[in-house]
Amino acid sequence: MIVLLGYMGSGKSLIGKKLAEVLQWPYADLDTLIAQAAGQTIPEIFREKGEIKFRIIESEVLQKELKQPKNQVLALGGGTPCYAGNMDKLLEAPEVTTIYLKTDLDVLVSRLWPERALRPLIAHLNSQEDLKDFVRKHLFDRSPYYMQAQHRIDSSEKTPQQIVAEIVALLF
Ligand code: S3P
């Protein structure tokens, strides 16, 4: 299983889908699996159950996926590696390769600003400056988890095709 991790807006889903297509492996998105398990969208879970409950469901769904090792590309949520010992579980799981899609702060902010309403953690931010401050601090907190991934790819100035080719060359 290839697991893609990185901050919101780092391209995990887009790259994951393209990589799965190239490898002819199934693709799964942890947020989609969480929404299915909860019978609610991610913003609904945050609004009605709260972030802690979201993190509990997220960790349960991840552990279930890791128990079924298979040829699959799995895109995590941006916070997944940073809670509930999830990064340790990923690193201990057999036949799992973790890849961190590392993206520059300015690139993240320009991608996230137009779609902030869809993401509960940043939906309340009213200016690009506030978003940038939030993401900068959040990356500072989260990078130590992301950096534990077995591989890191700088995705800031590359096309999705280049990133997919880089991952394939790295692993096969
Ligand atoms: C989150 C990222 C989201 C989603 C949830 C929380 C985070 O996933 O899991 O809104 O904590 O960074 P994406 O990274 O796919 O947007």
Image (spheres, grey):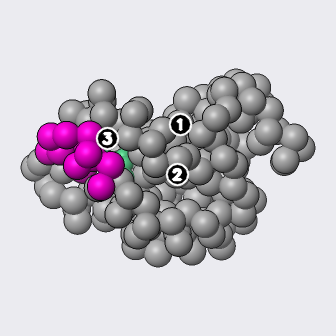
Ligand 1 neighbours mark 2 (CB distance < 8 Å): yes
Which stretch appears magenta? Answer: 121-133
Q: 149 or 130: which is nearer to us?
A: 130
| Residue 25 shows up from this direction | no
Residue 11: which disc? 1
Q: Which of marks 2 and 1 is nearer the N terminus?
A: 2
Circle 2 sits on which residue? 6
Q: 144 or 29: which is nearer to us?
A: 144
Ligand 1 neighbours mark 1 (CB distance < 8 Å): no
- Classify mark 1: residues with Cα within 10 Å, few (<14), some (14-19) or many (20+): many
- Residue placed at 38% from the left, 58% from the top? 136
Q: Which of marks 3 and 1 is nearer the N terminus?
A: 1
Residue type, mark 2 in image: Gly
Q: Where is residue 74 in the image (x, y as percent from the top left)?
A: 58, 44
In this image, 53 relative to 85: left or right?
left
Q: Are marks 3 and 1 in contact (CB under 8 Å)?
A: no
Element type where label 3 sits in the image: helix
Residue type, mark 3 in image: Ala
Does the magenta run of residues contain 77? no
In this image, 157 relative to 29: left or right?
right
| Residue 157 shows up from this direction | yes
The span from disc 2 to disc 1 (Cα, nearest Å) is: 8 Å
Q: Which of marks 2 and 3 is nearer the N terminus?
A: 2
Q: Are marks 2 and 1 in contact (CB under 8 Å)?
A: yes
Q: Are marks 2 and 3 in contact (CB under 8 Å)?
A: no
- Classify mark 3: residues with Cα within 10 Å, few (<14), some (14-19) or many (20+): some
Q: 80 or 164: which is nearer to us?
A: 164
Q: Position of residue 97 (x, y in %)?
A: 72, 56
Circle 3 sits on which residue? 35
Element type where label 1 sits in the image: loop
